[in-house]
Image (cartoon, helix red, strand yellow):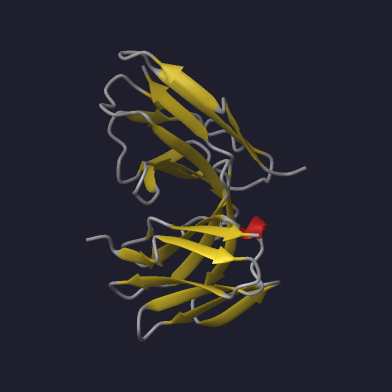
Amino acid sequence: KNEVEQSPQNLTAQEGEFITINCSYSVGISALHWLQQHPGGGIVSLFMLSSGKKKHGRLIATINIQEKHSSLHITASHPRDSAVYICAVFYGGATNKLIFGTGTLLAVQP
Amino acid sequence: DGGITQSPKYLFRKEGQNVTLSCEQNLNHDAMYWYRQDPGQGLRLIYYSQIVNDFQKGDIAEGYSVSREKKESFPLTVTSAQKNPTAFYLCASSSGQGFYNEQFFGPGTRLTVL
């Protein structure tokens, strides 16, 4: 069982829709990253958060430490948002590891 | 422009050959990482280096080797001992040491074994 679970695996939306991608993890973490991978393969870091909520433009990321769950929201989605969105959790301390989810493939249709 | 470059973008290798993937960064970052990405799987860490002349094995280091002789360069060699080397390889760097810090990724190299 992967230590990081993302849902859905695939998502198709119409332009303008509000999108939510979910990430769940099994044990306590120190921080969580959201990444975006473009069709060409390049990866961009979107957010790193350890509590609460962060917002950047049309993207919002939230994390609930008690429930071991994070969400990435995209408001007013656009075809250029089409990409794979990857959640990665950081286990600190002696573990010191970054574990990646398998990603959510998002396609936004005009 | 600051960033990470990887070369080549596509690489084809015959079985039994060693190949070296290049990763260069001009961000003045201390830490550098190599990841492997396979379809349906999350990124997996091959090797990482937190400082020049030092590096550590990641989760799947067998069949790979690295060097870190310069701060800006972290080449990865895929040896013939790697049983299934066909994959997408990503290099990353971060300003701080440790996985807590934001990582900046290169464009990747797609390696295919013929």
Picture residue at 37% right of the left edge, 43% below the top: B39
User: Residue A90: horizontal and vertical position, in percent?
Assistant: 41, 65
Tell me if B26 is positioned left or right of B90 in this view.
right
Tell me if B15 is positioned left or right of B77 in this view.
left
User: Residue B15: horizontal and vertical position, in percent?
Assistant: 31, 15
Picture residue at 30% right of the left edge, 19% below the top: B80
**Viewer-side residue, B23 vs B90:** B90
**Viewer-side residue, B64 vs B11:** B11
Q: Quadrant of residue B113?
A: top left
View extreme (right): residue: B1
User: Residue A84: horizontal and vertical position, in percent?
Assistant: 50, 55
**Viewer-side residue, A45 vs B45:** A45
The C terminus of chain A appears in which quarter of the rendering? Answer: bottom right
User: Residue B22: horizontal and vertical position, in percent?
Assistant: 54, 28
So how many labels did they put on this image? 0
Q: Is residue A86 above or below residue B22?
A: below
Picture residue at 35% right of the left edge, 30% below the top: B64
Q: Is residue B46 above or below residue A66?
A: above
Q: Quadrant of residue B84?
A: top left
Tell me if B62 is positioned left or right of B104 in this view.
left
Tell me if B75 is positioned left or right of A23 in this view.
right
Picture residue at 35% right of the left edge, 84% below the top: A67
- The reply to whether residue B31 is in sight is no
The N terminus of chain A appears in which quarter of the rendering? Answer: bottom left
Q: Is residue B60 above or below residue B66?
A: below
- The reply to whether residue B4 is in sight is yes
**Viewer-side residue, A102 vs A48:** A102
